Image: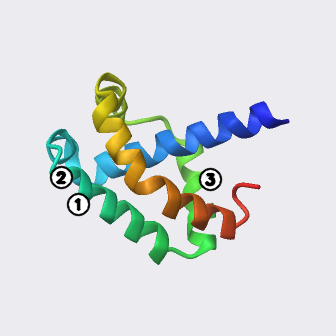
């Protein structure tokens, strides 16, 4: 049971990275000073969304294939562990708290 929860969390974190890049572009995230801005926007999105909105977005996102831009964003974060760590450090706690409040994680 814990393994499937870990897989789900990994997918959510990957989705968060994709969303941030899709919203603000690969160029913005490629610059380290922009990490704060991008992460801030992602956190604002989650904090400003209702649980119902998040559930709907999740259902829509899981049924759609990833765009080329999203795939490039994931690859960028995979190739640069420092950039990935900086991004995740900024968004993980606020987003995890919101997902917990919405019953999306245990």
Q: Is residue 63 visible?
A: no
| Residue found 43% across the figure and 55% down from its top | 91
Q: Position of residue 49 (x, y in %)?
A: 50, 74
- Image height of 84 relative to 44, above or below: above
Q: Give the crowd class for mark 1: few <14, some 14-19, many >=20 residues within 10 Å.
A: some
- 39 on left or right of 34: right
* CA separation in Å, label 3 and label 2: 29 Å
* CA separation in Å, label 3 and label 1: 27 Å
* CA separation in Å, label 2 and label 1: 5 Å
Marker disc for residue 34: 2
| Residue found 29% across the figure and 54% down from its top | 23
Q: Position of residue 103 (x, y in %)?
A: 73, 64
Residue behind mark 3? 59
Q: Are marks 2 and 1 in contact (CB under 8 Å)?
A: yes
Q: Which sits earlier in the primary sequence, circle 3 or circle 2?
A: 2
Q: Which sits earlier in the primary sequence, circle 3 or circle 1?
A: 1
- Label 3: which secondary element: helix
- Image height of 99 relative to 78, above or below: below
Q: Position of residue 7 (x, y in %)?
A: 67, 33
Residue behind mark 1? 37
- 83 on left or right of 43: left
On-image quarter of the C terminus: bottom right
On-image quarter of the N terminus: top right
Q: 103 or 97: which is nearer to us?
A: 97
Q: Give the crowd class for mark 3: few <14, some 14-19, many >=20 residues within 10 Å.
A: few
Q: 56 or 17: which is nearer to us?
A: 17
Q: Are marks 3 and 2 in contact (CB under 8 Å)?
A: no
Asked which quadrant contains residue 71, the reply is top left
Q: Position of residue 94 (x, y in %)?
A: 50, 64
């Amino acid at each position: 049971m814990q393994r499937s929860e870990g897989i789900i969390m990994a997918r959510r974190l990957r989705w968060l990275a994709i969303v941030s890049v899709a919203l603000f572009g690969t160029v913005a995230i490629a610059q380290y000073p922009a990490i704060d801005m991008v992460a801030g926007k992602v956190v604002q999105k989650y904090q400003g969304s209702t649980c119902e909105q998040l559930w709907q977005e999740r259902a829509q996102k899981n049924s759609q294939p990833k765009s080329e831009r999203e795939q490039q964003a994931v690859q960028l974060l995979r190739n640069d562990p420092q950039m990935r760590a900086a991004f995740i450090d900024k968004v993980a706690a606020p987003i995890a708290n919101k997902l917990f409040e919405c019953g999306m994680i245990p």
